[in-house]
Image (cartoon, rainbow, N blue to C red):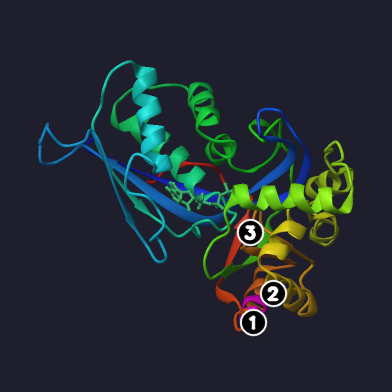
Amino acid sequence: MSAITVRVPAKVNLQLAVGPLREDGYHDLVNVFHAVSLFDEVTAAEPADGDLSAAPLRVRVEGDHTGEVPVSDDNLAVRAAMALADRAGRSYRADLLIRKSIPVAGGMAGGSADAAAALVACNELWGLGLPVEDLMEIAADIGSDVPFALLGGTAVGTGRGERLAPLETAGIFHWVFALADGGLSTPRVYGECDRLREEAGVAAPTPAVSEALLAALREGDAKALGQALSNDLQPAALALRPSLADTLAAGRAHGALGALVSGSGPTCAFLAESAERAHELAGLIKDVDGCRAVVTAHGPVPGATVAG
Ligand code: ATP
């Protein structure tokens, strides 16, 4: 094979419970991840030019609003490919092409998704044949959200989010995502969450998974799921980007079953009862101030997968 393309989904957090700040700088989390049908594609190809003096791993990025995505070793897909080559114990070459649809710095784990896709693509391109368990280990070293992008579906993450247990779900859930202009830095949003808690004098609770959420997922009950959605980072995201409150309010006013900021934001997620309602809702919120674009998607969908 001279080129392998992998499709990888974005995630929305159905529950993000943020515990106290740990000594290692991370927070203890309960993170219910849900993979949705908004995909990036990563192609790993053998370099065509045979120029052995060029960097062994090169990356290009295509798509709208991708100006902030690094095309250097800082790109998470490149870091993943390097970590994979390290594990295999020798140097390998690849040209990576990332076609982005997942909003950048949008709270939908696009960078982590690209890292997961690069692991799957390079494992195949280089003929390494590493099992998924090994890829999961490498993924967890790259970032807390990367293992879930390999797994997909719906899963609960604990620790800093990287210890994953798949969840049983029924049916398909229909979503609308309101993309915002510009991103929000994840570390900044966590910092604001700590600051708001300190200011209010509230201790961070020990995070626990919501039983109501688990029951709604098991039963495929969209209405109950809408009521059980929660995100402890939402107050911090709203403090940093007050216009998101209007976006959420517009979705609720137009009948969304649930509305929340996705992860660290600024993307807002709305649950609808059907694909038709999701399309209607998208049309109704697309002109709200601060909303750059709307997309509809469904979940759960599988994790990083080699495209046919
Ligand atoms: P999360 O939901 O995991 O907190 P996010 O969706 O808010 O993340 P990302 O799109 O993953 O944010 O990107 C955050 C930052 O990571 C970007 O601003 C960019 O500088 C850097 N980055 C590195 N590699 C990538 C990549 N392949 N795609 C997007 N961003 C990347």
Sequence-first tag of 2 and 3: 2
Task: Please tell me whether residue 208 belongs to the stretch shown in magenta.
Answer: no
Q: In 3D space, how far apart are the residues under numbered discs 2 and 1 (Cα atoms)?
A: 6 Å
**Residue 295, position as x, y percentages in the image:** 56, 69
Q: Residue at x 65, y 54 (%)?
A: 264
Q: On residue 247, which mark appears? A: 2
Q: Amino acid at mark 1?
A: Val
- Tell me if label 2 and label 1 are in contact, CB under 8 Å: yes
Mark 2 neighbour density, 10 Å: few (under 14) some (14–19) many (20 or more): many
Q: Which of the pair 208/69 is nearer the observer?
A: 69
Task: Give the quadrant of residue 267.
Answer: bottom right
Q: Which of the pair 277/283 is nearer the observer?
A: 283
Asked if residue 297 shows in the view, the reply is: yes
Q: On residue 288, which mark appears? A: 1
- Tell me if label 2 and label 3 are in contact, CB under 8 Å: no
Looking at the rendering, the stretch of residues picked out in magenta corresponds to 281-285
